[in-house]
Protein backbone atom coordinates (compact mmCIF):
# COMPACT_ATOMS: atom_id res chain seq x y z
CA UNK A 1 0.00 0.00 0.00
CA UNK A 2 1.48 3.34 -1.05
CA UNK A 3 2.19 5.80 1.72
CA UNK A 4 0.61 9.20 1.24
CA UNK A 5 1.85 12.33 2.95
CA UNK A 6 -0.46 15.20 3.68
CA UNK A 7 0.74 18.69 4.47
CA UNK A 8 -1.35 20.52 7.05
CA UNK A 9 -1.08 24.31 6.98
CA UNK A 10 -1.59 25.78 10.44
CA UNK A 11 -1.93 29.40 11.45
CA UNK A 12 -0.94 30.57 14.90
CA UNK A 13 -3.35 33.51 14.64
CA UNK A 14 -6.42 31.46 13.76
CA UNK A 15 -7.43 30.93 17.42
CA UNK A 16 -7.33 34.71 17.84
CA UNK A 17 -9.88 35.17 15.07
CA UNK A 18 -12.17 32.61 16.67
CA UNK A 19 -11.80 34.40 20.00
CA UNK A 20 -12.64 37.71 18.30
CA UNK A 21 -15.83 36.24 16.81
CA UNK A 22 -16.91 35.02 20.24
CA UNK A 23 -16.02 38.37 21.79
CA UNK A 24 -18.19 40.26 19.30
CA UNK A 25 -21.22 38.08 19.97
CA UNK A 26 -20.85 38.21 23.75
CA UNK A 27 -20.30 41.97 23.88
CA UNK A 28 -23.26 42.54 21.57
CA UNK A 29 -25.49 40.52 23.91
CA UNK A 30 -23.99 42.37 26.89
CA UNK A 31 -24.80 45.78 25.37
CA UNK A 32 -28.39 44.73 24.58
CA UNK A 33 -28.87 43.21 28.04
CA UNK A 34 -27.52 46.33 29.69
CA UNK A 35 -30.04 48.44 27.77
CA UNK A 36 -32.91 46.07 28.61
CA UNK A 37 -32.05 46.34 32.29
CA UNK A 38 -32.03 50.17 32.25
CA UNK A 39 -34.26 51.04 29.30
CA UNK A 40 -36.46 53.24 31.49
CA UNK A 41 -33.51 55.53 32.15
CA UNK A 42 -33.20 56.55 28.49
CA UNK A 43 -34.87 59.71 27.25
CA UNK A 44 -35.21 58.32 23.72
CA UNK A 45 -35.28 54.53 23.99
CA UNK A 46 -36.48 54.17 20.39
CA UNK A 47 -33.12 55.48 19.15
CA UNK A 48 -31.32 52.88 21.24
CA UNK A 49 -33.67 50.10 20.11
CA UNK A 50 -33.13 50.95 16.45
CA UNK A 51 -29.36 50.96 16.92
CA UNK A 52 -29.38 47.62 18.75
CA UNK A 53 -31.39 46.00 15.97
CA UNK A 54 -28.74 47.10 13.49
CA UNK A 55 -25.97 45.96 15.83
CA UNK A 56 -27.58 42.55 16.35
CA UNK A 57 -28.07 41.89 12.64
CA UNK A 58 -24.63 43.24 11.72
CA UNK A 59 -22.79 41.18 14.34
CA UNK A 60 -24.39 37.90 13.36
CA UNK A 61 -24.24 38.56 9.60
CA UNK A 62 -20.55 39.41 9.65
CA UNK A 63 -19.33 36.44 11.67
CA UNK A 64 -17.81 34.86 8.51
CA UNK A 65 -15.87 38.09 7.98
CA UNK A 66 -13.98 37.65 11.23
CA UNK A 67 -13.21 33.99 10.60
CA UNK A 68 -9.73 34.70 9.17
CA UNK A 69 -7.50 37.47 7.89
CA UNK A 70 -8.35 36.57 4.28
CA UNK A 71 -12.09 37.17 4.80
CA UNK A 72 -11.61 40.32 6.88
CA UNK A 73 -11.32 42.97 4.16
CA UNK A 74 -10.49 46.63 4.55
CA UNK A 75 -13.97 47.63 3.46
CA UNK A 76 -15.48 45.47 6.18
CA UNK A 77 -13.14 46.94 8.80
CA UNK A 78 -14.11 50.47 7.82
CA UNK A 79 -17.84 49.65 7.93
CA UNK A 80 -17.49 47.79 11.24
CA UNK A 81 -15.66 50.69 12.86
CA UNK A 82 -18.33 53.06 11.51
CA UNK A 83 -21.04 51.00 13.23
CA UNK A 84 -19.21 51.30 16.53
CA UNK A 85 -18.50 55.03 16.18
CA UNK A 86 -22.13 55.69 15.23
CA UNK A 87 -23.32 53.99 18.41
CA UNK A 88 -20.92 56.07 20.51
CA UNK A 89 -22.06 59.35 18.92
CA UNK A 90 -25.78 58.37 19.25
CA UNK A 91 -25.44 57.92 23.00
CA UNK A 92 -26.11 61.65 23.81
CA UNK A 93 -29.24 61.43 21.64
CA UNK A 94 -30.67 58.39 23.45
CA UNK A 95 -29.53 59.21 27.00
CA UNK A 96 -29.67 62.38 29.03
CA UNK A 97 -26.59 64.51 29.57
CA UNK A 98 -26.76 63.91 33.30
CA UNK A 99 -26.50 60.15 32.84
CA UNK A 100 -23.60 60.59 30.43
CA UNK A 101 -21.77 62.79 32.92
CA UNK A 102 -22.52 60.20 35.62
CA UNK A 103 -20.61 57.63 33.55
CA UNK A 104 -23.32 55.61 31.78
CA UNK A 105 -21.84 53.28 29.12
CA UNK A 106 -22.18 54.17 25.45
CA UNK A 107 -24.73 52.30 23.35
CA UNK A 108 -22.23 49.75 21.94
CA UNK A 109 -20.36 49.67 25.26
CA UNK A 110 -17.28 47.41 24.98
CA UNK A 111 -18.40 46.04 21.59
CA UNK A 112 -16.44 48.88 19.94
CA UNK A 113 -13.20 47.36 21.21
CA UNK A 114 -13.89 44.35 18.98
CA UNK A 115 -13.70 46.58 15.91
CA UNK A 116 -10.32 47.89 17.01
CA UNK A 117 -9.10 44.36 17.74
CA UNK A 118 -10.11 43.31 14.23
CA UNK A 119 -7.81 46.03 12.90
CA UNK A 120 -5.02 44.71 15.13
CA UNK A 121 -5.41 41.12 13.92
CA UNK A 122 -5.59 42.18 10.31
CA UNK A 123 -2.78 44.72 10.04
CA UNK A 124 -0.76 44.65 13.24
CA UNK A 125 -0.13 47.30 15.86
CA UNK A 126 -0.04 50.23 13.40
CA UNK A 127 -3.56 49.49 12.20
CA UNK A 128 -4.65 49.10 15.82
CA UNK A 129 -3.27 52.52 16.75
CA UNK A 130 -4.95 54.03 13.69
CA UNK A 131 -8.37 52.57 14.59
CA UNK A 132 -8.08 53.52 18.28
CA UNK A 133 -7.72 57.20 17.48
CA UNK A 134 -11.26 57.86 16.12
CA UNK A 135 -12.72 55.74 18.92
CA UNK A 136 -10.98 57.96 21.48
CA UNK A 137 -12.18 61.12 19.74
CA UNK A 138 -15.78 59.85 19.57
CA UNK A 139 -15.80 59.00 23.28
CA UNK A 140 -14.58 62.47 24.20
CA UNK A 141 -17.10 64.14 21.86
CA UNK A 142 -20.12 62.21 23.18
CA UNK A 143 -19.20 63.08 26.77
CA UNK A 144 -18.55 66.74 26.02
CA UNK A 145 -15.24 66.91 27.87
CA UNK A 146 -12.53 64.41 28.82
CA UNK A 147 -12.86 62.74 32.19
CA UNK A 148 -10.78 60.31 34.17
CA UNK A 149 -13.08 57.38 33.37
CA UNK A 150 -13.12 58.23 29.65
CA UNK A 151 -9.34 58.59 29.44
CA UNK A 152 -8.90 55.35 31.38
CA UNK A 153 -11.18 53.43 28.99
CA UNK A 154 -9.59 54.94 25.89
CA UNK A 155 -6.05 54.17 27.06
CA UNK A 156 -7.05 50.63 27.97
CA UNK A 157 -8.43 49.97 24.49
CA UNK A 158 -5.46 51.65 22.81
CA UNK A 159 -2.80 49.79 24.77
CA UNK A 160 -4.55 46.42 24.55
CA UNK A 161 -5.12 46.66 20.79
CA UNK A 162 -1.55 47.80 20.07
CA UNK A 163 -0.15 45.00 22.22
CA UNK A 164 -2.30 42.39 20.49
CA UNK A 165 -1.32 43.79 17.09
CA UNK A 166 2.35 43.48 17.98
CA UNK A 167 1.86 39.91 19.19
CA UNK A 168 0.16 39.07 15.89
CA UNK A 169 3.08 40.48 13.91
CA UNK A 170 5.56 38.44 15.94
CA UNK A 171 3.44 35.32 15.53
CA UNK A 172 3.30 35.78 11.76
CA UNK A 173 7.06 36.27 11.56
CA UNK A 174 7.59 33.13 13.65
CA UNK A 175 5.22 31.19 11.42
CA UNK A 176 7.11 32.27 8.30
CA UNK A 177 10.40 31.27 9.92
CA UNK A 178 9.00 27.88 10.89
CA UNK A 179 7.61 27.31 7.41
CA UNK A 180 10.98 28.16 5.88
CA UNK A 181 12.75 25.81 8.29
CA UNK A 182 10.36 23.00 7.37
CA UNK A 183 10.95 23.65 3.68
CA UNK A 184 14.72 23.51 4.18
CA UNK A 185 14.40 20.31 6.18
CA UNK A 186 12.26 18.72 3.48
CA UNK A 187 14.67 19.86 0.76
CA UNK A 188 17.60 18.45 2.75
CA UNK A 189 15.92 15.08 3.12
CA UNK A 190 15.17 15.00 -0.60
CA UNK A 191 18.74 15.96 -1.46
CA UNK A 192 20.06 13.22 0.80
CA UNK A 193 17.80 10.71 -0.90
CA UNK A 194 18.95 11.86 -4.34
CA UNK A 195 22.57 11.77 -3.17
CA UNK A 196 22.18 8.14 -2.11
CA UNK A 197 20.61 7.20 -5.43
CA UNK A 198 23.25 9.08 -7.41
CA UNK A 199 26.06 7.56 -5.38
CA UNK A 200 24.75 4.06 -6.00
CA UNK A 201 24.43 4.60 -9.74
CA UNK A 202 25.85 7.62 -11.56
CA UNK A 203 28.94 8.27 -9.43
CA UNK A 204 29.99 4.63 -9.51
CA UNK A 205 29.62 4.52 -13.28
CA UNK A 206 31.68 7.69 -13.72
CA UNK A 207 34.39 6.33 -11.42
CA UNK A 208 34.47 3.08 -13.38
CA UNK A 209 34.77 4.98 -16.69
CA UNK A 210 37.65 7.00 -15.25
CA UNK A 211 39.54 3.90 -14.13
CA UNK A 212 38.92 1.95 -17.34
CA UNK A 213 39.87 4.92 -19.48
CA UNK A 214 43.18 5.32 -17.69
CA UNK A 215 43.94 1.62 -18.25
CA UNK A 216 42.98 1.56 -21.95
CA UNK A 217 44.71 4.84 -22.80
CA UNK A 218 44.37 6.89 -25.98
CA UNK A 219 41.01 8.56 -26.56
CA UNK A 220 39.56 6.47 -23.75
CA UNK A 221 41.98 8.17 -21.33
CA UNK A 222 40.61 11.57 -22.32
CA UNK A 223 37.07 10.28 -21.86
CA UNK A 224 38.06 8.90 -18.46
CA UNK A 225 39.53 12.26 -17.46
CA UNK A 226 36.32 14.06 -18.37
CA UNK A 227 34.30 11.45 -16.48
CA UNK A 228 36.51 12.01 -13.43
CA UNK A 229 35.94 15.77 -13.53
CA UNK A 230 32.20 15.31 -13.80
CA UNK A 231 32.29 12.84 -10.92
CA UNK A 232 34.00 15.40 -8.67
CA UNK A 233 31.62 18.18 -9.71
CA UNK A 234 28.56 16.00 -9.18
CA UNK A 235 29.85 14.73 -5.85
CA UNK A 236 30.40 18.33 -4.67
CA UNK A 237 26.91 19.30 -5.79
CA UNK A 238 25.05 16.48 -4.06
CA UNK A 239 27.15 16.58 -0.88
CA UNK A 240 26.94 20.27 -0.07
CA UNK A 241 25.28 22.22 -2.81
CA UNK A 242 27.61 25.12 -2.01
CA UNK A 243 27.84 26.60 -5.47
CA UNK A 244 24.98 27.64 -7.80
CA UNK A 245 26.78 26.73 -11.03
CA UNK A 246 25.08 28.28 -14.03
CA UNK A 247 27.40 27.39 -16.87
CA UNK A 248 30.32 25.01 -17.30
CA UNK A 249 32.78 25.28 -20.15
CA UNK A 250 35.81 23.03 -20.53
CA UNK A 251 39.07 23.72 -22.31
CA UNK A 252 40.08 20.16 -23.19
CA UNK A 253 43.36 21.26 -24.67
CA UNK A 254 44.60 22.89 -21.46
CA UNK A 255 42.66 20.58 -19.15
CA UNK A 256 41.01 23.50 -17.38
CA UNK A 257 37.47 23.76 -16.06
CA UNK A 258 35.91 27.24 -16.01
CA UNK A 259 32.70 27.87 -14.12
CA UNK A 260 30.72 31.10 -14.30
CA UNK A 261 28.65 31.77 -11.20
CA UNK A 262 25.54 33.93 -11.21
CA UNK A 263 25.16 35.77 -7.91
CA UNK A 264 21.94 37.47 -6.75
CA UNK A 265 21.90 41.22 -7.25
CA UNK A 266 20.18 41.90 -3.93
CA UNK A 267 23.08 40.63 -1.81
CA UNK A 268 25.00 43.36 0.03
CA UNK A 269 28.26 44.31 -1.65
CA UNK A 270 30.27 44.18 1.58
CA UNK A 271 28.31 41.51 3.42
CA UNK A 272 30.00 38.32 4.61
CA UNK A 273 30.22 35.40 2.21
CA UNK A 274 31.25 31.79 2.76
CA UNK A 275 34.71 31.41 1.26
CA UNK A 276 33.99 27.74 0.54
CA UNK A 277 31.40 28.70 -2.09
CA UNK A 278 34.03 30.63 -4.04
CA UNK A 279 36.70 27.93 -3.81
CA UNK A 280 34.39 25.00 -4.62
CA UNK A 281 34.57 25.58 -8.43
CA UNK A 282 38.33 24.96 -8.40
CA UNK A 283 37.93 21.37 -7.21
CA UNK A 284 38.29 18.82 -9.97
CA UNK A 285 39.86 15.54 -10.96
CA UNK A 286 43.38 16.90 -10.34
CA UNK A 287 42.58 19.56 -7.75
CA UNK A 288 41.57 18.45 -4.26
CA UNK A 289 39.86 20.84 -1.84
CA UNK A 290 40.06 20.36 1.93
CA UNK A 291 37.88 22.77 3.88
CA UNK A 292 36.31 23.11 7.35
CA UNK A 293 32.89 21.66 7.93
CA UNK A 294 31.56 25.02 9.13
CA UNK A 295 31.19 28.19 6.99
CA UNK A 296 34.28 30.37 6.55
CA UNK A 297 32.85 33.92 6.50
CA UNK A 298 34.77 36.80 4.96
CA UNK A 299 33.71 40.21 3.66
CA UNK A 300 32.66 39.78 0.04
CA UNK A 301 35.46 41.89 -1.53
CA UNK A 302 38.13 40.11 0.52
CA UNK A 303 36.70 36.68 -0.28
CA UNK A 304 36.64 37.44 -4.00
CA UNK A 305 40.24 38.68 -4.02
CA UNK A 306 41.41 35.66 -2.04
CA UNK A 307 39.59 33.28 -4.40
CA UNK A 308 41.11 35.11 -7.38
CA UNK A 309 44.59 34.68 -5.88
CA UNK A 310 43.92 30.94 -5.49
CA UNK A 311 42.80 30.83 -9.13
CA UNK A 312 46.00 32.58 -10.20
CA UNK A 313 48.08 30.03 -8.26
CA UNK A 314 46.23 27.16 -9.95
CA UNK A 315 46.75 28.80 -13.34
CA UNK A 316 50.48 28.79 -12.65
CA UNK A 317 50.27 25.10 -11.75
CA UNK A 318 48.59 24.24 -15.05
CA UNK A 319 50.91 26.50 -17.03
CA UNK A 320 54.25 25.51 -15.52
CA UNK A 321 53.73 22.11 -13.91
CA UNK A 322 51.81 20.57 -16.79
CA UNK A 323 48.33 19.20 -17.33
CA UNK A 324 49.11 16.03 -15.40
CA UNK A 325 50.19 17.82 -12.22
CA UNK A 326 48.02 17.49 -9.16
CA UNK A 327 47.17 20.34 -6.78
CA UNK A 328 45.75 20.53 -3.27
CA UNK A 329 43.87 23.42 -1.66
CA UNK A 330 43.74 23.54 2.13
CA UNK A 331 41.50 26.08 3.91
CA UNK A 332 42.23 26.79 7.59
CA UNK A 333 39.92 29.00 9.66
CA UNK A 334 42.11 30.43 12.44
CA UNK A 335 40.76 32.69 15.24
CA UNK A 336 42.21 35.91 13.75
CA UNK A 337 42.97 34.98 10.16
CA UNK A 338 42.16 32.64 7.31
CA UNK A 339 44.96 30.66 5.69
CA UNK A 340 44.59 29.06 2.26
CA UNK A 341 47.44 26.85 1.06
CA UNK A 342 47.84 25.78 -2.57
CA UNK A 343 50.35 22.97 -3.11
CA UNK A 344 51.27 21.00 -6.22
CA UNK A 345 53.47 18.05 -7.10
CA UNK A 346 55.15 19.71 -10.07
CA UNK A 347 58.88 20.13 -10.73
CA UNK A 348 59.08 23.28 -8.59
CA UNK A 349 60.44 26.70 -9.46
CA UNK A 350 64.15 27.10 -10.13
CA UNK A 351 66.00 29.57 -7.92
CA UNK A 352 65.83 33.09 -9.31
CA UNK A 353 63.08 32.29 -11.79
CA UNK A 354 60.51 34.56 -10.10
CA UNK A 355 62.85 37.56 -10.13
CA UNK A 356 63.66 36.87 -13.77
CA UNK A 357 59.96 36.64 -14.69
CA UNK A 358 59.24 39.91 -12.90
CA UNK A 359 62.09 41.56 -14.77
CA UNK A 360 60.60 40.32 -18.05
CA UNK A 361 57.27 41.95 -17.18
CA UNK A 362 55.48 38.76 -16.12
CA UNK A 363 53.73 39.82 -12.94
CA UNK A 364 51.51 36.81 -12.30
CA UNK A 365 52.91 36.05 -8.85
CA UNK A 366 53.88 39.64 -7.98
CA UNK A 367 50.50 41.21 -8.80
CA UNK A 368 47.85 38.48 -9.16
CA UNK A 369 48.85 36.79 -5.92
CA UNK A 370 51.06 38.94 -3.71
CA UNK A 371 49.52 42.22 -4.82
CA UNK A 372 46.00 41.05 -4.04
CA UNK A 373 46.98 39.80 -0.58
CA UNK A 374 48.93 42.98 0.18
CA UNK A 375 45.85 45.09 -0.62
CA UNK A 376 43.85 42.97 1.83
CA UNK A 377 46.40 43.47 4.59
CA UNK A 378 47.51 39.87 4.32
CA UNK A 379 50.54 38.07 2.94
CA UNK A 380 51.51 35.48 0.36
CA UNK A 381 54.43 33.16 1.02
CA UNK A 382 55.80 31.00 -1.78
CA UNK A 383 57.97 28.00 -1.03
CA UNK A 384 59.38 25.94 -3.88
CA UNK A 385 62.02 23.23 -3.92
CA UNK A 386 63.17 21.97 -7.33
CA UNK A 387 61.76 18.51 -7.89
CA UNK A 388 59.41 18.69 -4.88
CA UNK A 389 56.64 20.98 -6.07
CA UNK A 390 55.52 24.43 -5.00
CA UNK A 391 53.52 25.63 -2.02
CA UNK A 392 51.74 29.02 -1.84
CA UNK A 393 50.42 30.09 1.55
CA UNK A 394 47.83 32.91 1.46
CA UNK A 395 46.96 34.60 4.74
CA UNK A 396 44.10 37.09 5.15
CA UNK A 397 43.19 38.73 8.49
CA UNK A 398 39.56 38.58 9.52
CA UNK A 399 39.69 42.26 10.56
CA UNK A 400 40.54 44.82 7.92
CA UNK A 401 43.54 47.08 8.38
CA UNK A 402 41.35 50.13 9.10
CA UNK A 403 39.38 48.33 11.81
CA UNK A 404 42.58 46.86 13.28
CA UNK A 405 44.13 50.32 13.59
CA UNK A 406 41.03 51.66 15.33
CA UNK A 407 41.00 48.67 17.68
Image (spheres, rainbow, N blue to C red):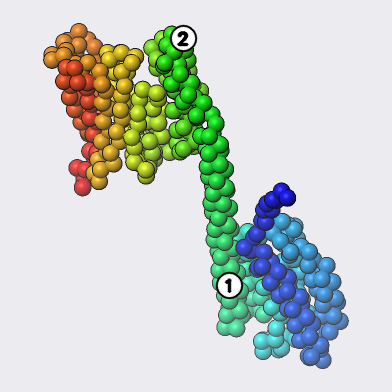
- Element at label 2: helix
Q: Nearer the viewer, residue 243 or 105?
A: 243
- Residue at figure coordinates x 72%, y 56% from the top left: 70
Residue 32 located left or right of residue 255:
right
Q: Residues within 10 Å of mark 1 (few under 14, many from 20)?
A: some
> Splitting the image into 4 quarters, where does residue 25 fall?
bottom right
Rendering coords of residue 316 (x, y %): 28, 17
Question: Which residue is under mark 2?
Answer: 219
The numbered disc on residue 250 is none
Nearer-N-terminus badge (2/1): 1
In the image, is residue 348 above or below residue 279? above
> Splitting the image into 4 quarters, where does residue 149 fall?
bottom right
Rendering coords of residue 9 (x, y %): 66, 56
Residue 16 located left or right of residue 45:
left
> Splitting the image into 4 quarters, where does residue 173 fall?
bottom right
Rendering coords of residue 135 (x, y %): 66, 70
Residue at the far left in the pictured view: 351
- Quick check: can you spot residue 115? no
How far apart, in angstroms, are the residues tagged by discs 2 and 1?
78 Å
- Quick check: can you spot residue 209? yes
The numbered disc on residue 160 is 1
Do the residues under discs 2 and 1 have CB atoms within 8 angstroms? no
- Element at label 1: helix
Q: Nearer the viewer, residue 129 or 403?
A: 403
- Residue at figure coordinates x 79%, y 91% from the top left: 37
Q: Residues within 10 Å of mark 2 (few under 14, many from 20)?
A: few
Rendering coords of residue 202 (x, y %): 54, 29
- Residue at figure coordinates x 69%, y 50% from the top left: 3
Q: Nearer the viewer, residue 19 or 27?
A: 19
- Residue at figure coordinates x 19%, y 17% from the top left: 387
In the image, is residue 143 above or below residue 250? below
Amino acid sequence: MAKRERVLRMSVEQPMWRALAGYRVLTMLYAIGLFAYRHDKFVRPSVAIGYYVVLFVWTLATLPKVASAAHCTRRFLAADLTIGLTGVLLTPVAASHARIVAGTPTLPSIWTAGSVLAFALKGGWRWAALASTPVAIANVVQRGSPSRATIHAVLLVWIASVAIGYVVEVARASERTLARALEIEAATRERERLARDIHDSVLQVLAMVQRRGAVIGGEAAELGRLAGEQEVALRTLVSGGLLPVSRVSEDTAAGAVVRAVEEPDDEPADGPVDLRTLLAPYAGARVSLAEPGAPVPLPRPAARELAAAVGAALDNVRRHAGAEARAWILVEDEPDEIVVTVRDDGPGIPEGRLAQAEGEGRLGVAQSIRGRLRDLGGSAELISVPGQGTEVELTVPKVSRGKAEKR
